[in-house]
Amino acid sequence: MRRGPARPGARRRKGAPRGAPASVPAERLQKVLAAAGLASRREAEGWIRAGRLTINGAPATLGARVTPQDQVRLDGRLVRAQPSITGARVFLCHRSPGEPLRTPEGAASDLHSHAPRPGLIERLPRRAGRRFISVSPMPRVDGGLELVTSDGALAARLQRGVHALTSEFGVRVRGELSETQLAGILEGVLDGGAPLTVQRCETAGGEAANRWYTLAVRGASGKEVRQLFERQGALVSRVMRTHLGPLTLERTLGRSQFRELTQEELDALVPVASPDSG
């Protein structure tokens, strides 16, 4: 039986194969690539502009949406979408101060030098993903708890959610802080004027001329923690993240080691992130 002509104004979804069910949910191409662990959404946009992506044989355009029935190819190779949360692989890493997450480019350019030790991310299980993304990474000079995942969509959600998390840092400074300095840190004012929500700053022992302080603060990066102390004239030599929301850097996890989050830990971590609206 032949169908009648299409209703006026009815249009087939751009990029969808003919005959695809209208009820199939479509997602933005950038989101699909991020969920597959291939790139961040910003990188995916660059690939679209460069003409590296096609949908069902046609060049992809910004704003295009795809379904599981569509064939997306990157440089001619088929891209398979993955679920954004279910089955996500997330790792908690203990990074030593100065240890790179990834081997710096050009580190092995000298053929007469010894090959550098792979970065922390590069030692994660290959079966867990092809590209790992770090969530709110600490500055290289510092270290402690690092969170990485091969799920780009989850990484984006967690990155936004970090601003709602309370984290703890161990901060090593030269000498003992005065009451005035401690009061200034508790105010949480940064150079840009935007305040941080500091819950507490307590002494945590020390050795020789150095003193450690434990800082509990909401939504702060390692860089901001340094700035917070240095604004008060403190000489900061080390910042170590020990807690990130519900996650703790346990003593049994040695430096340069990592472990995968349990499903319970992931379930506790994900709700803090805002829903993905892409």
Image (cartoon, rainbow, N blue to C red):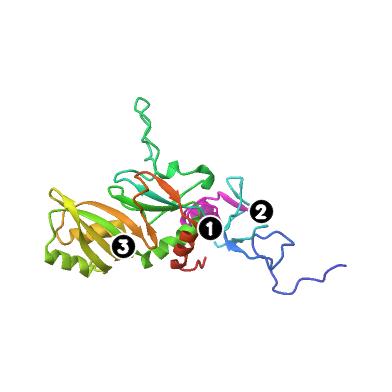
Q: Earlier in the sequence, mark 1 or mark 2?
A: 1
Q: Which amino acid type is marked by label 3?
A: Ala
Front residue of 166 and 24: 166
Marks 3, 1: nearer the viewer: 3
Residue 56 image label: 2
Q: Which residue is mark 3?
A: 220
Q: CA distance from mark 3 to mark 1?
A: 28 Å
Q: Quadrant of residue 211?
A: bottom left
Residue matched to label 1: 30
Q: Which of labels 2 and 3 is toward the front?
A: 3
> How far is disc 2 from disc 3 in space, using C-alphas?
43 Å
The x and y percentages for residue 51 are 55, 50
Q: Residue at horizontal 33%, vertical 43%?
A: 99
Judged left or right of residue 138, residue 231 is left
Magenta-span inclusion, residue 45: yes
Could you tell me which secondary element the residue under label 2 belongs to?
A: loop
**Of circles 1 and 2, which is in front?**
1
Instruction: Name the spot of residue 100 as percent of width and height, x first.
Output: 35, 44
